[in-house]
Image (spheres, rainbow, N blue to C red):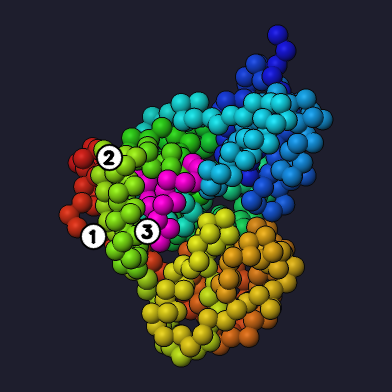
Amino acid sequence: MARKNVLIMGAAGRDFHNFNVFYRNNPDYNVVAFTATQIPNIEGRIYPKQLAGKLYPNGIKIYEESKLEELIKKLKVDEVVFSYSDVPFEYVMTKASIVNAAGVSFRLLGAAETQVKSNKPVVAVLAVRTGCGKSQTSRKIVEVLTKAGKKVVAIRHPMPYGDLVKQKVQRFATYADLKKHNCTIEEIEEYEPHIARGGVIYAGVDYEAILREAEKEADVILWDGGNNDFSFYKADVIFTVVDPHRPGHELKYYPGNTSLRMADCAIINKIDSADAANINIVRENIQLVNPNATIIEAASPVTVEKPELIRGKRVLVVEDGPTLTHGEMKYGAGTVAAQKLGAKEIVDPRPYTVKSITETYKKYPNIGTLLPAMGYGKQQMKDLETTINRTKCDVVVIGTPIDLSRYIKINKPHTRVKYDLQEIGSITVETILREKKIVK
């Protein structure tokens, strides 16, 4: 019987995982191509033969998603598998319609087909959108587990933007490891906060191999999710973060709605800066789709290293890149801090952008007057540095999860904004972990 020709639509993350766990050694399927979107400079590469397995001695080519219809015909595709995240339902079904109109099937792989089982307890942190607050939630969970005497090893949703063979399994425990693996800003933003607290975090491409390495040194595995995707591992407890600044998104984005429905605990974050009406909308929607989920209300208060630099000044606010781009947020921690501390003006960086940063604004025109910390590779990091230094402002307010000044040279005064999860009320992350017997 002929193998079914499959094309996997992705963005260098979930797509590779779905291939590894479901298709790589499956004699019923022949993956003829990946397509790529969201992340720059992925298309044109090859998923290497060293990772693709014996059924794919030449590896698998990665194309631009814009060539989807052409590829379906050219490669005689029988089935298209959608494998990336943080997109509206309408977007997914539009892709499905394009695929179906080309005469082939459209598929979404579920948890049972893609999740790997660990021999250690797994705590998963998910969200309904990018930028809800997974990072501070993960840090809080690590803090609670560590205090309880558990050795926690975090595993981050993939961001393999470099040499995929070298990135098969990556372990980060020191700042030197970030340099060793030639990490992008997007990677550093996720890994550095764990390292700064003395933790260990793994990432890479082959998530079963990653898990087996992490299990050797962990009492508990923390799945530190990316975008609004669901976990690559079968979890013992799932925390899903929702954002009252984007009420209703928890019902309308894929696969964030899946992540909410899977939650043991839904965390309504940012209640300190959200409207009460929007908090109620989000709470009602949680109860609508997952009435058994425990709800935690939380704030993410910001602290500023040098608050005196902001008051009365013209500031350039640099926020987390994915949060502003495909996350569609209109502001982040840097904006909150600038407004709270009385900045005279938030300077529009668009007249000063160069090269790839200019292209980012063309692709995401609704970003507005904030600067997304785009850094997918050395050239884009250089473009970001040039844009910051060209912008006519008094101070740079860094609202990203890392101190950008460690990785790019900023030629004007700058200050960093930090934020942590603060639970409100008697139900906390710790009470959930005790209820689920992750800690005693």
* Residue 378 shown in magenta: no
Q: Which is more foreground, mark 2 or mark 1?
A: 2
Residue sitting nearer the eye, 249 or 272: 249
As helix, strand or loop, the secondary structure at mark 2 comes to loop
Vertical placement of 337 versus 59: above or below? below
Task: Please state the horizontal and vertical placement of residue 187, each as a whole percent of the image.
Answer: 56, 55
Q: Residue furthest top?
A: 1
Residue sitting nearer the eye, 70 or 226: 70
Left or right: residue 357 compared with residue 175: right
| Residue position marked by numbered label 3 in the rendering | 244
Which portion, as a residue range, is magenta?
A: 239-255
Q: Quadrant of the C terminus?
A: top left
Left or right: residue 122 compared with residue 297: right
Q: Which of the two discs, 2 and 1, labels the residue nearer the N terminus?
A: 2
Task: Please state the horizontal and vertical placement of residue 229, each as a whole percent of the image.
Answer: 49, 43
Distance (Cα) linking label 1 and label 3 = 15 Å
Which residue is drawn at the image coordinates 73% and 30% (left, top)?
Answer: 102
Whether residues under marks 1 and 3 lie with C-beta atoms below 8 angstroms apart, the answer is no
Q: Which of the two discs, 1 and 3, labels the residue nearer the N terminus?
A: 3
Three-letter amino acid code at the position of disc 3: Pro
| Residue position marked by numbered label 1 in the rendering | 424
Which residue is drawn at the image coordinates 56% and 44% (left, top)?
Answer: 90
Q: Residues within 10 Å of mark 3 (few under 14, many from 20)?
A: many
Distance (Cα) linking label 2 and label 3 = 18 Å
| Residue position marked by numbered label 2 in the rendering | 291
Q: Residues within 10 Å of mark 2 (few under 14, many from 20)?
A: few
Residue sitting nearer the eye, 216 or 107: 107
Vertical placement of 216 versus 188: above or below? above
Task: Please state the horizontal and vertical placement of residue 258, each as a whole percent of the image.
Answer: 43, 39
* Residue 250 shown in magenta: yes
In which quarter of the view is residue 239 placed? top left
